[in-house]
Amino acid sequence: DFVNTAKLVHGKTINYSLYDKYSNRAIAREHKLYKVEIKIFVKRFILELCLWENPRLSLYCFCSVMLCCYYSSVALALPCFLGTLLVILSDNHAQYVSNEIRNFGYCKPSFGELLCALLFGGN
């Protein structure tokens, strides 16, 4: 029944009246699922780093860990982490946006288009 499914998942009926006990259960169930998914993702990510499946990312992480050890500074961990995120984003950009075969006709905006959008809010 759709009504029971809506109550179970969102804690609301079709009339959007709130049922707290259903809502709290659904939120707790969703939180538990996300915790499991994030745990699996982190394990897989660390395994890929250790096995050098993505050499550019693994090399960057290795060099940043060695840099932190060389300077004996935990304060460098945050910039190294942010650099790792930038390497991941640049790899995704190269794989999905710049690759003609995989982008399915997507045309990235030019610098002029971005500048006009920022300055004038439109074309």
Image (cartoon, helix red, strand yellow):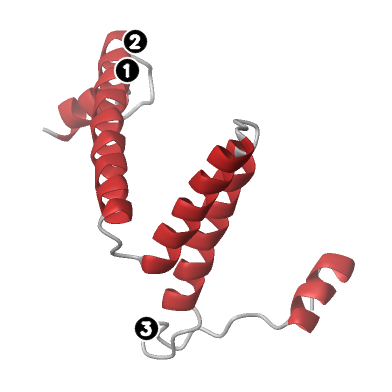
For disc 2, the marked residue is 20
Name the residue rendered at 40%, 58% in the picture.
Answer: 58
Residue 121 x, y percent position in the rendering: 82, 66
Which amino acid is tagged 1?
Ser
Residues under numbered marks 2 and 1 in contact, where contact means CB atoms less than 8 Å apart: yes
Q: Which residue is mark 3?
A: 102
Does label 1 or label 3 sit earlier along the sequence? 1
92 and 47: which is toward the camera: 47
| Residue at 58% across, 47% down | 67
Question: Seen in the image, is 36 located left or right of residue 78?
Answer: left
Which tag, 2 or 3, sits closer to the chain's start? 2
At which x and y percent is residue 69? 54, 39
Residue named by callout 1: 23
- Measuring 11% from the left and 32% from the top, which residue is drawn there? 1
Left or right of 42 in this view: 122 = right
Image quadrant for the C terminus? bottom right
Left or right, 85 with reference to 20: right
Image position of 4 with respect to 85: above or below: above
Q: Amino acid at mark 3?
A: Arg
Tell me the SS state at disc 3.
loop
Position above or below: 21 against 15: above
Marks 1 and 3 sit apart, C-alpha to C-alpha, by 40 Å
Q: Measure the alpha-carbon separation of dots 2 and 3.
A: 45 Å
